[in-house]
Image (cartoon, rainbow, N blue to C red):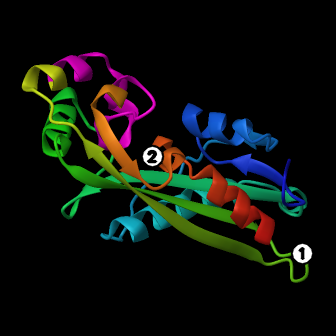
Amino acid sequence: MNPCKKNIILASASPRRKELLAQIDIPFNVKVSGAEENAKCTEPQDLVRELSLMKAEDVYRSLTDEETKNILVIGADTVVAYEGEIMGKPHSKEDAVRMLTVLQGKTHQVYTGVTFVYQNEETGAECAHAFYEKTDVTFYPMTEQEIEDYVATGEPMDKAGAYGIQGKCAAYISGISGDYNNVVGLPIARVYQELKKL
């Protein structure tokens, strides 16, 4: 069910992003980006677009000229933001506890930036199409023990904001406003709609 004519490469090692693309029957291959994430942007919506572009460009530029004719690379990046603080993946268990302590009982925002990098069929030039999606997530209050127990599962360690909405943290989500899949890591409906426009 690929809405664009090109073969798709997902520039991400995330099992959640792979599952979401597979869920809507888009055929794709995976090639993980090795780009260093040295972003300059400080606003969350700009940061995720910049990082998703870095990842997509890194993979696109590793392809041969012949390969790029028929390929579209999808890069994505997700962050959590609360009152100006941008939260990526926690650096340690203590960092995960700190993030969850900040988020518990409150509403925060999840931003995912997505970039398509591909070759323009008419000019042969490299093109980039970037967008982002924002979802509000509200947590129930969590006790210190609940936070410690959740962090001890190891689930928060590879996730922005130190939680997975689709995992054990579901017990503490009181509501969301926006795209659920965006919080998981890829706003898949928006991705599909944007691919249709190309």
Q: Quadrant of residue 115?
A: bottom right
In the rendered image, residue 84, in percent from the top left (x then y), is placed at: 20, 64
Q: Nearer the viewer, residue 40 or 165?
A: 165
Q: Could you tell me the amino acid type at mark 2?
A: Val
Q: Is residue 75 above or below residue 148?
A: below
- Which residue is painted at 30% across and 43% down in the image? 161
Q: Is residue 13 visible?
A: no
Helix, strand or loop under label 2: helix
Left or right: 133 in relation to 159: right
Q: Which residues are magenta?
A: 148-168
Q: Quadrant of the C terminus?
A: bottom right
Q: Position of residue 17 (x, y in %)?
A: 59, 40
Q: Is residue 183 visible?
A: yes
Quadrant position of residue 147: top left
Rendered location of residue 18, percent (x, y): 65, 37
- In front: 151, or 143? 143
Q: Is residue 134 left or right of residue 128?
A: left
**Closest to the observer, 107 or 124:** 107
Read off the residue under disc 1: 121
In this rendering, the answer to whether 31 lies above or below 77 is above
- What is the CA distance from the residue labelled 2 to the residue labelled 1? 33 Å
Badge 2 is on which residue? 183
